[in-house]
Amino acid sequence: MFNSAAVFDTSEGTSKRFSVPVVQELASQHLHSLPERYIRSEKERPNDFPLQQTDIPIIDMDMFLSDSEFCRQKELEKLGTACQQWGFFQAVNHGIPVSMMERMKKIVREFVQLPLEEKLKYEMQEAEGYGQLFVASDNQVLDWSDIVFLTTLPTENRKMNFWPTTPADFRETVDRYALEIQKLCKTIFCLLSEKIGLKRDTFINMCGEMEQAIRMNYYPACPRPDLVLGISPHADGSALTALLQDDETVGLQIRKDGQWFSIQPIPGALVINVGDVLEVLSNGIYKSIEHRAVTNIDRDRVSIAMFYTPRKEAELGPAPELIDELNPCQYRTFIHEDYMRHFFRSKLEGKACLEFVRIK
Ligand code: OGA
Ligand code: NI
């Protein structure tokens, strides 16, 4: 019933793996009481049921292909505001076929339905494969989810032995989806660069060739959703993240002005959010917002996060053009790989990771 969670290394700099249960197996046992390791402290519990809902901005990606400069500018304005005030938006008319998105969710479900023994062939090691991430100690409270984490781009960085071969089209489907999402993220990244007066390719040039990883989240139904979290509060370490989720099942929550709000899925839309890297590059203009996922009592949930990230050798810091007397530099320069090491070695904890590079 146990499998491994992988971390790059511990805070002492040594490599260590922690064994954690497969949550799906726990959930299937119809336990009367939850294992203690999943029970959150009172202040972390999602006890604000019934949840408040909020609508994050909706951005029509079609507008950026418009012949009308007026329409384009208007949508660009909305996109900028969304990323400055919310750090989150829903992208619609993004051009990624609905059939491809549906198939992506389906392959995750088909994979998790395989016998445990089959899934454990892809057991996580060094942050690739099936298991759990961000487990940094034997006694930390665990997330109510099982995940598959894979490096997707550039293709030569893929570790194919962690890529499932069942369902039969798993690899091909992820491959095609990865390319589509990369294109979409690039478009958004360039627009966000343009929006704050930089050249369209300034951010991309600062990052080197962009890389990508996928995190497939499976949140089994939970008998006590009031006591657990599907994923701990965190901000993403990426530049941008594109989240695909079940149409019918609410789970994602974002923190705005200190309060947690549920995000209602829009069928066919992708939830896009600003990650720590973009907050840094923009010197804090764009906000990497804390978010988490909650579980449901009567249904499981699938979500798929694609992380659009700089290459690991990239030296990152705020774009020099954005800094002057009125706008002092807010983050120190760092190598992306060092940031990621720091990110993966800790448990997920709100926006704590960004403090690593923030100038006090
Ligand atoms: C993530 C994430 C939220 C969700 O994978 O980084 O924030 O709703 N997921 O699954
Ligand atoms: Ni996230």
Image: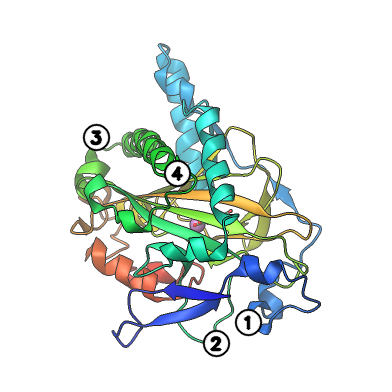
Residue at x-position 57% and y-position 56%: 114
Q: Position of residue 204 (x, y in %)?
A: 25, 42
21 left or right, relative to 332: right
Q: Position of residue 211 (x, y in %)?
A: 28, 49
* Residue tagged 1: 37
Disc on the earlier residue, 4 or 3: 4
Give the label on residue 139, or none.
Answer: 2
Q: Are marks 2 and 3 in contact (CB under 8 Å)?
A: no
Disc on the earlier residue, 2 or 1: 1
Disc on the earlier residue, 1 or 4: 1
Disc on the earlier residue, 3 or 1: 1
Which residue type does callout 2 highlight?
Answer: Asn
Q: Secondary structure at mark 2?
A: loop
Q: CA distance from mark 2 to mark 3?
A: 47 Å
Using the image as rendered, state which of residue 128 and residue 78 is in the foreground: 128
Circle 3 or circle 1, nearest the eye: 1
Task: Name the colour scheme.
Answer: rainbow
Give the label on residue 170, or none.
Answer: 4
Q: Position of residue 106 (x, y in %)?
A: 57, 42
Circle 2 or circle 3, nearest the eye: 2
Total labels drawn: 4
**Is label 4 within 8 A of ligand 1 (CB to nearest ligand atom)?**
no
Q: CA distance from mark 2 to mark 1?
A: 7 Å
Give the label on residue 199, or none.
Answer: 3
Q: Secondary structure at mark 1?
A: helix
Using the image as rendered, state which of residue 305 and residue 235 is in the foreground: 305
